[in-house]
Amino acid sequence: MIKCGNFYLTSWVTTILKLVKQNSRVKEFKMTTEHKHGSMDTEVQEKTFAGFINWTTKTVIVCILALIFIALVNG
């Protein structure tokens, strides 16, 4: 064991190895479940995307109008 401050490095290594093992178990579980293409409900994602496009369009229009206004004021 190597002492580093008040902690021993072996305890850190052991903790990291335990987390890696847990993550690999979770990945194995996720990979064994079957996925059927096209079965997911995407209504929420479609509404979010439509809202994002709407907000982006309005923001671009405001920016363009602000630039035109600045150009007209500075003459």
Image: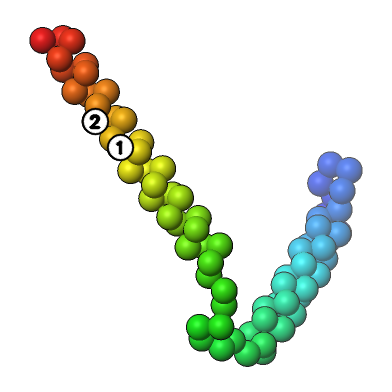
Q: How many marks?
A: 2
Would you say the residues marked 1 and 2 are in contact, meaning their CB atoms lie under 8 Å apart?
yes
Residue 42 marker: none
Residue at position x 24%, y 30% from top? 64
Q: Is 68 located above or below residue 75 in the figure?
A: below
Q: Which residue is mark 2?
A: 64
Residue at position x 59%, y 87% from top? 35
Q: Residues within 10 Å of mark 2 (few under 14, many from 20)?
A: few
| Local secondary structure at mark 1 | helix
Location of residue 36 by image quarter: bottom right
Q: Is 38 located above or below residue 45 in the figure?
A: below
Q: CA distance from mark 1 to mark 2?
A: 6 Å
In the image, farthest residue toward the right: 6
In the displayed structure image, the side of residue 57 where residue 23 appears, left or right: right
In the displayed structure image, the side of residue 2 where residue 41 appears, left or right: left
Q: Nearer the viewer, residue 2 or 40?
A: 40
Q: Nearer the viewer, residue 62 or 29?
A: 62
Tell me which amino acid carries mark 1: Val
Q: Which residue is mark 1?
A: 60
Q: Is residue 36 in view? A: yes
Q: Is 31 located above or below residue 72 in the figure?
A: below
Q: Nearer the viewer, residue 15 or 49?
A: 49
Residue 75: x %, y % from top left: 10, 10
Tell me which amino acid carries mark 2: Ile
